Image (cartoon, rainbow, N blue to C red):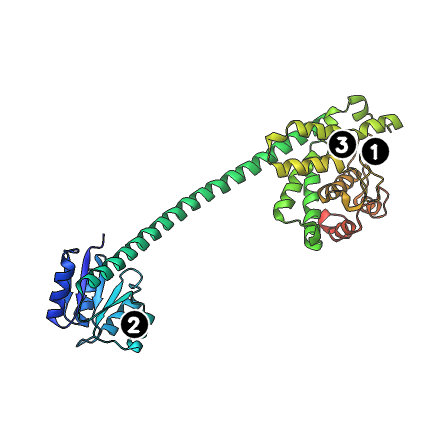
Amino acid sequence: MREKILIVDDVATNRDILSVMLGEIYPDIIEANDGENAIEMVEKYVNDISVILLDLIMPKKSGYDVLEYMIQKNLLEEIPVLIISGESSLEAERKCLNLGVADFIRKPFDKVSVQKRVKNTVDLYRYKSELEKKVVSQNAALNKQNKLLNEQAVKLRENNEKILDLLGNVVEYRNLESGEHIKRVKKLTRILAEEVAKNYKEYGLDSHKVDIIVAASAMHDIGKIAIKDSVLLKPGRLTDDEFEYMKSHTTKGCDILQNVEDAWDKEYGLASYEICRHHHERFDGRGYPDGLMGDDIPISAQIVSIADVYDALVSERVYKEAYDSETAFRMIMNGECGVFSPKLMVCFRKVKDKLNIA
């Protein structure tokens, strides 16, 4: 703790008077008889001095020289300086204030005034120092807490994605597919979503939202868990009634998701719900289950819809052979698989090479 008071004056009588006045409150007083000696004392007791009473006009080095030294060493923020001087000009006072002095003590000295000014200055700087330490300590605690929260957020995101992948894989194995469909849809979704984010800011997609859409894309067919095998695994074309029943996988999937909505973050839950329910909607309103039209269809579902359709076309299924990539691309662009957003079709065309389409 800083306990020393440094009195700097080339007149011994002035130093003695101040020492007596302040000794009643601050017993640890040190003295310097000129500016050069003052700098030596500061260097020696830099961590122990609580305040400096500094005369301006002195031999060898003046009080201004001492102030310049303290400025160079960045000491005025830690050690306050009170000017003790008979100099009463406004110019000298302004100069000292501009240099960063804390206060002035005029000669001749008044005991009460000297004690009050010194005490107020010491207490103010002590409070300031303690406050700065508390701020540093609180910032360190906040940084530690933020680091922990960030680590927890990363862990939560990883758990969200693991849950989604796990549920998605259940559908894949139930559907007797290789288990690679979800991985491919996620890859295609990311490519397309990043292109949409780059070209159409109005959708408000950033890297975080793209990550959520990609993870949630695994849920697009979760409702097929509730579809009976005779329809889900039928090798031929479905009847009209069977197709109507198959379409219910969108709403059945939403029922499943609502039953487990507390298991993951709300953002993931909402994106999963939107994709599951609306990935078969079409831009002209001829999709299902709600017949949504245009951008009433969530952008997440619009993006996953294209990724899902493209992968379905280029993959072999129990009811069809695989189309080549160029044919699949042409079918989507020509509207043979339903009408998609013109904006998304622009993006789909731009990412053609990224999809390994010849």
Label 3: how many Cα within 10 Å (few below 14, some 14–19, many 20+): many
Q: Nearer the viewer, mark 2 or mark 3?
A: 2
Rendered residue at 12%/66% (across/down)? 17
**Regarding mark 2 in the picture, which secondary structure is present there?**
helix
Residue 176 appears in view: no
Say which mark, if any, is on residue 96. 2
| C-alpha gap between disc 2 and disc 3 | 78 Å
Cβ–Cβ below 8 Å for labels 2 and 1? no
Single out the residue that lies furthest toward the right: 240
**Disc 1 target residue:** 320
Say which mark, if any, is on residue 250. 3
Query: What amino acid does circle 3 point to?
Result: Thr
Instruction: Find residue 312 and report its horizontal and vertical position in percent.
Output: 78, 37
Left/right placement of residue 149 relative to residue 252 reads left
Residue 166 falls in image quadrant: top right
Query: What amino acid does circle 1 point to?
Result: Lys
Instruction: Find residue 252 and report its horizontal and vertical position in percent.
Output: 74, 28
Rendered residue at 34%/71% (across/down)? 98
Rendered residue at 41%/48% (across/down)? 139
Left/right placement of residue 199 relative to residue 117 reads right
Instruction: Find residue 211 and report its horizontal and vertical position in percent.
Output: 63, 43
Rendered residue at 60%/30% (across/down)? 263
Disc with the residue nearer the chain's start (2 vs 3):
2
Cβ–Cβ below 8 Å for labels 2 and 3? no
